[in-house]
Amino acid sequence: WLLLTRCIAAAPSALKSASSSSSDESNDQQSQPNHGGPQTTPSIERFSEFGDSFTEDAESSSWVPLNVLDAHDAYVLKIRFAPGPARLLATCSSDGTAQIWQSHSDGFSRQCGFNGHPRWVWDCAFGADRRSFYTAC
């Protein structure tokens, strides 16, 4: 079962939702950011009320989170950073939602939410065109 949801936007703060089931459009969802230069990646301790953490090593207790993003009511299954300079982060969850967040120096602000998926949202991806967003459940 695969449900693709496509979000088209003129700017990150003006995201709108449109549905698509075309397998051709899903080919651009695998675009990865360029890791050739310095990266600005936020340090996030948890994404759910359960306190799920990215780390399981002995050193993790000494880390100090810069921001905490309380994004979903259940398990977060995937996070993705948008390609390019947009500073967008997407999260998807077993609560049936996907969220898009704008990264700021002092934290995150929610830009767009996708509710009503019939199942867990297992994956999400930004399109290579930097205007599309896909979800799969």
Image: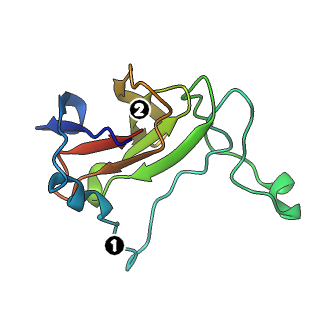
| Outermost residue toward the top in this view | 116
Q: Image check: 50 left or right of 73?
A: right
Q: Position of residue 58 (x, y in %)?
A: 89, 62
Which label number is shown at residue 99?
2
Rendered image coloring scheme = rainbow
Helix, strand or loop at disc 1? loop
Query: Which residue: 28% across, 57% down?
Result: 29
Give 10 or 127, whichever is nearer the viewer: 127
| Outermost residue toward the right in this view | 58
Q: Amino acid at mark 1?
A: Asn
Residue linked to disc 1: 34
Q: Earlier in the sequence, mark 1 or mark 2?
A: 1
Query: Which residue: 35% across, 26% down?
Result: 114
User: Image quarter for residue 104?
Assistant: top left
User: Image quarter for residue 133?
Assistant: top left
Which label number is shown at residue 67?
none
| Outermost residue toward the front in this view | 1
Q: Amino acid at mark 2?
A: Gln
Query: Which residue: 41% across, 42% down?
Result: 90
Q: Position of residue 17 (x, y in %)?
A: 20, 28
Q: Residues within 10 Å of mark 1 (few under 14, many from 20)?
A: few
Helix, strand or loop at disc 2? strand
